[in-house]
């Protein structure tokens, strides 16, 4: 695997009107983020590494690859959710347009279900801007929790309807983060926030997987504005899986009938 | 990595009204397709393997993992396409809804751009139904090409506006397929179809990456009806990458201005 | 009201690179399809007339306005359908993005539910191309039905699971069409096709509202390729209505719970 | 035309599990919001009136019909916008799925382009809750503008890049509102807010059409949470119009080529 991207600099040409460094092609070569797709990437890196390259412009270290793949793997499949039901119902009316069914499923990934990945990452990245000196993390955590409580806003990334008192998926990510030396100030701060929130509210508030992912995304330098995209790219895989199951053992028509029969003025 | 899925059979309960084997959760355990997410999958398999599990219900062998990841990696990033432009333009109007911008990009993955993965897989799977005995592949190829020409329909998976006389991405997949013993009758048939098409038409018709992917998807047992989903899941990653670039060095507003100024009665 | 559109011709300027006649604006004037939006359209025409203008480039006659509005009115609200359920489920996850919930609902308007408007219009428009001389309609009808039966394909626009032996909505459109002198060869042909289909199959096959709409759309000169758009534009209204009801008396969470509890391996 | 809806009350049946009053069907009758679709609505009301019925549960008075139709008519067609470009680019890849192209166009109707209809309605409805006694409107306007300036947030519904110093579409709506007696406290407050904003900032800030629509939507009792839906339902019509133009004189491929050629690292 080549670490150095091949240079795409052209000499003596005017700067392009629209700047993009994502990809370019010639008859016998495809370049993606400076890497030769065919020789450097295909058969050399996995899909998670490719997502890492797309978001960061570089290939992950071994430890980063393990963590990043684990983060995405945990977001792929969440069983029967509003998203997978919506996708199946859409497929019922337009089986010739699989992309529409997947898109319909993705459109429900807003503030309620994946917003907390983004929310947690935002809290952490605004508290510890890139390049900021080391901070008094416990004080930061105390302030963050207090401010959220003052605004009557839940701290994103905490709590879960099923996984209590701990979220096993977060535990796994933290173990991997420690093992591979990825855990840093963002992870530490998120954990302090979780402890502080339980202390201030007296409630059980497990650091759930979206909070853990928000923390690790921050460690990996992924801006909070696209952290929701981690859930989107992973869930697109899960939705295709559900649609294949729908093709083989459909439930959408049954769901429609039940809802219709159960509804009225 | 555990190969045997843990059993989810419940005893003496009525069959569920809606059948789904995708996932279930308890407070301390998440099961996906029979595997323990936290202990069997996170940190053990990569995102491509997870997609394989979603589509086939089993984990890939080492060779299958290499090929399947390579297939998906080749579909993630295709530079400035109608899809990435549409996603950027959508983000311009709704930056608070990243899922809408990704969805808008995916909605253009229809018959024109990813339909050939599905089309090639369909041709191959209808010619060689699962479990069929060995066939006279050259004769099959000849018939398939002749029938398409008779219907004035291009054979899906052949030809490319840029990559000629061969598509380097297909070449790479075939090399990996041979190396890992994945190539079989579907790959052989697709290659024979490509040769036959060039012979019958006298034109250069490289077996492009969508045809190669259709062939390998068939080797891996992925039904043609969801092969388009391979392009969808991969492209969702590329779209998030483009949207991050758009946030940092936007082009959408410039595109809008140019189109508006350039258009009129 | 038919008026002459104000001319937008510019003199001595090069032709625009991208041709579009939809709309243009100056500080004190907005022109849509040649008409002054503020003075000619707002407060003068209704929304259905505006849709007619968008699709045909002219304002409808009084009779055309009545029929076209009736066609669209009949397509707005169909109760609890897969589309409205999908929209509600999407809203559950992304209430801050109403456009996503509406879009999710529209994505299910494919071949199964609105494809028959397009299908019926296509059959009629291919049988009677614009400007063709009068034809032997009964023979055309016989041939069309026979060809569909030979391909084992249902004739689009016939049959209905609920409305038998006639669809009251079609009856109403035909009455309006006769009253306003809009009914012509396309309507006549569609009715002959319906009679012929019942004759050839021996089954009750009411000419349903999508077949009637396909016929009238053809009378009005709307190409079959956008007839599906009539269902899309109307249903977008119905979806917003359902989403307002969902805000006030939600059902989506209840649906999700029922589906989740009812599903399993 | 206001009529009494036919009663749908059923006697002695358990309440439905999911409440919905949108529509129901029997073999010979379709009921929408209590009205008989075929006899009361088709051929009797226009599409704008149907949208009014969907959102309010009643038919509009004559004046309400004029205003509501004018509001929606003004939102249908805005020429070459990011939305119409995105829709055309999506159609390029999936011409067999018109619903996807329309959906892609709608997904860009977020905070930037239609958010101000919702924003203006929200400001007005939160300032004057339904049923509130008459208020000191000038003081309210002064407070609202001051609070927005303090938060460094623009007041929604004011300003326009092209239409200055007044937006002719707003002027038209106000004239219609006065003529038909629809203008009331919300309209008065919005106008006071506009004047106050110009006074406090010293800048020209025309009350644009989204602010005017937000005000009239409030007069008509449409909750701010679905006001964005007015833009969505109207724009779905405009998008179908643009897609028909794209079919006849396409620009999407040309746009793609220009963007691709104009972009680079």
Image (cartoon, coloured by chain):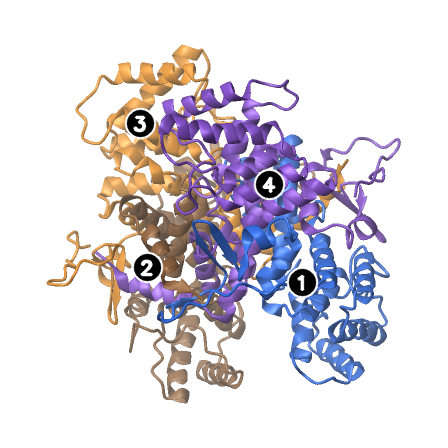
Chain colours: A brown, B orange, C purple, D blue
Split into 4 quadrants, where in the image is the N terminus of chain A?
top left
Query: Where residue B98 sits: x, y (%)?
Result: 52, 57
Q: Which mark is residue C175?
A: 4
Q: Is residue A128 left or right of residue D192?
A: left
Per the model, the C-alpha gap separating discs 2 and 1 is: 41 Å
Q: Secondary structure at mark 2?
A: loop
Q: Where does label 2 land, which residue? A: A80
**Are dots 3 and 2 on a single chain?**
no
Q: Which mark is residue B172?
A: none
Seen at 24% across and 57% down, the residue is B17
State which quadrant residue C182 falls in: top right
Q: Which mark is residue D60?
A: 1
Q: Secondary structure at mark 1?
A: loop
Seen at 21% across and 20% down, the residue is B135
Q: Secondary structure at mark 3?
A: helix
Q: Mark 4 or mark 1, which is nearer to you? A: 4
Seen at 74% across and 40% down, the residue is C61
State which quadrant residue D79 falls in: top right
Q: Is residue A239 left or right of residue C234?
A: left
- C28, C228: nearer the viewer: C228
Query: Where residue A53 sits: x, y (%)?
Result: 45, 50
Do the CB atoms of the residues marked 4 and 2 lie less than 8 Å apart?
A: no
* Vertical position of residue C80 compared to residue C209: above or below: below
Per the model, the C-alpha gap separating discs 1 and 3 is: 59 Å
Crowd around label 3: few <14 · some 14–19 · many ≥20 (10 Å) = many
């Amino acid at each position: 695997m080549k670490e150095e991207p091949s240079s795409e600099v052209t000499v003596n040409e005017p700067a392009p009107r629209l700047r993009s460094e994502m990809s370019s092609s010639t008859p016998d070569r495809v370049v993606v983020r400076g890497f030769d797709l065919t020789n450097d990437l295909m058969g050399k890196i996995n899909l998670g590494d490719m997502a890492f390259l797309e978001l960061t412009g570089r290939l992950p270290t071994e430890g980063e690859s393990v963590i990043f793949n684990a983060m995405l793997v945990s977001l792929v499949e969440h069983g029967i959710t509003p998203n997978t039901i919506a996708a199946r119902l859409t497929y019922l009316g337009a089986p010739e347009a699989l992309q529409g069914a997947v898109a319909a499923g993705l459109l429900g990934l807003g503030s309620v279900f994946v917003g907390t990945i983004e929310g947690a990452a935002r809290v952490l990245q605004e508290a510890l801007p890139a390049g900021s000196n080391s901070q008094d993390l416990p004080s930061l955590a105390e302030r963050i929790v207090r401010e959220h409580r003052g605004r009557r806003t839940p701290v994103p990334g905490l709590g879960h309807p099923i996984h209590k008192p701990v979220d096993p998926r977060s535990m796994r990510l933290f173990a991997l983060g420690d093992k591979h030396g990825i855990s840093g100030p963002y992870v530490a701060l998120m954990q302090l926030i979780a402890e502080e929130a339980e202390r201030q509210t007296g409630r059980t508030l497990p650091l759930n997987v979206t909070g853990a992912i928000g923390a690790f995304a921050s460690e990996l330098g992924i801006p909070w504005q696209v952290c929701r995209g981690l859930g989107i790219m992973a869930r697109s895989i899960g939705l295709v899986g559900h649609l294949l199951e729908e093709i083989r053992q459909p439930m959408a028509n049954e769901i429609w009938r039940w809802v219709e029969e159960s509804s009225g003025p």
